[in-house]
Amino acid sequence: MSKQKASKGLGRGLTDMPHYQNHFSSESKHKHPLFRSSDKLKEVSSSQNSPRIIGKMAGDIALVPIGQIIPNKDQPRTEFDKNALKKLANSIEELGIIQPITVRKLSALKYQLISGERRFRASQLVGLEELPAYIREADDKKLLEMALVENVQREDLHPIEIATSYKRLIDECNLSHEKLGNLVGKSRSSISNQLRLLDLPEEIKIALVTKKISQGHAKALLSISDNPDYQMVLFGLIKDENLSVRLAEEISRKGKKKKRKKKPTFEITDVESEAIHEINLRFSQRVKLVKASATSGKIEIKYSSQEELDKFLDKLSY
């Protein structure tokens, strides 16, 4: 790195904030790994094993040796874009770390990552030896909850990642839809609608993840889940014809009309038919048998005037 480029990053990051300016002299700021490229890291003493408190920002922030930090096995995000990590690494190399990571203390020299894995991985690419971190006490359940909540608030997540994180928060952290909504700043209905995306066929979910369809398209497809054949036809049209969300919604509404469920019919037996015939003859009335199942139903008596009804009731009383 040229001297000109190195100087551009000096003084930035956490130490440029008023909270930290008193913690770094001009000399120490130039030697700190958060503000130097990897070719200058050898200047930092490797004998420094314990985290050092450097300031406060919603809690104590300490510089933790990166070698003492282990990833969170319950990290909800399993894939990290290599190009995005490289861009972040370049930013860290030039500007320093702006947002501390959060870790949980496991032992005197061991910490587990709670949030900030992209910053952690990018810092490893740069070659930093220390990272600014909040050190929190959290049990495993709380650890997972904190990691998931931070994850769903990222702007670059695809809808299935968000829905999966919601489901894990509900299933593994025993959160209700309402409590989850309060945690992530969403309405209860928004949480429920997001979770429904997980009910889509795998082919449609993959298309949503790879951005071949939008979340608006996915919602239109969800509205005809009870008609899977029509759903896949519409899915094909969205992909092949590049349908707008509005047009997809219009087509899905037509599909719902076509799929109106027909009530099941049950055949009237000869015995039942004969009985209805006898009733009609006896009361001179239009009587109809409506079967609800093979063994149950109702008898409907039709009349066209009050006088006709009165005559029928008189015959019943004999």
Image: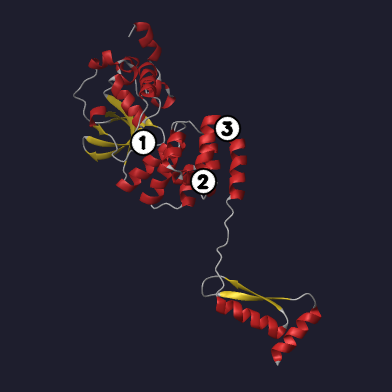
Residue situated in front as seen by the camera: 73 or 63: 73
Q: Residue furthest bottom?
A: 318
Residue situated in front as seen by the camera: 297 or 226: 297
Helix, strand or loop at mark 1: loop
Please tell me whether mark 1 or mark 3 is closer to you in this view: 3
* Picture disc at residue 77: 1
- Please indicate, yes or no, whether residue 302 appears anywhere in the rendered image: yes
Q: Residue furthest left?
A: 47
User: Horizontally, is 231 left or right of 16 in the view?
Assistant: right
User: Horizontally, is 47 left or right of 165 in the view?
Assistant: left
Residue 138 quadrant: top left
Name the residue rendered at 40%, 28% in the picture. 99
Name the residue rendered at 30%, 46% in the picture. 140
Residue situated in front as seen by the camera: 101 or 141: 141
Residue 88: give x, y in percent of width and height.
38, 22
Q: Please tell me how crowded label 1 is: few (under 14), some (14-19), or many (20+) other residues with Cα within 10 Å.
A: some
* Picture disc at residue 193: 2
Q: Amino acid at mark 1?
A: Arg
Q: Please tell me how crowded label 2 is: few (under 14), some (14-19), or many (20+) other residues with Cα within 10 Å.
A: some
Q: Earlier in the sequence, mark 1 or mark 2?
A: 1
Q: Earlier in the sequence, mark 1 or mark 3?
A: 1
Considering only vertical position in the picture, is 121 above or below 187? above
Between the residue at mark 1 and the residue at mark 2, the CA separation in whole angstroms equals 21 Å
Helix, strand or loop at mark 3: loop
Q: Amino acid at mark 2?
A: Asn
Number of numbered discs: 3
The residue singled out by tag 3 in the image is: 243
Between the residue at mark 1 and the residue at mark 3, the CA separation in whole angstroms equals 30 Å
Q: Amino acid at mark 3?
A: Leu
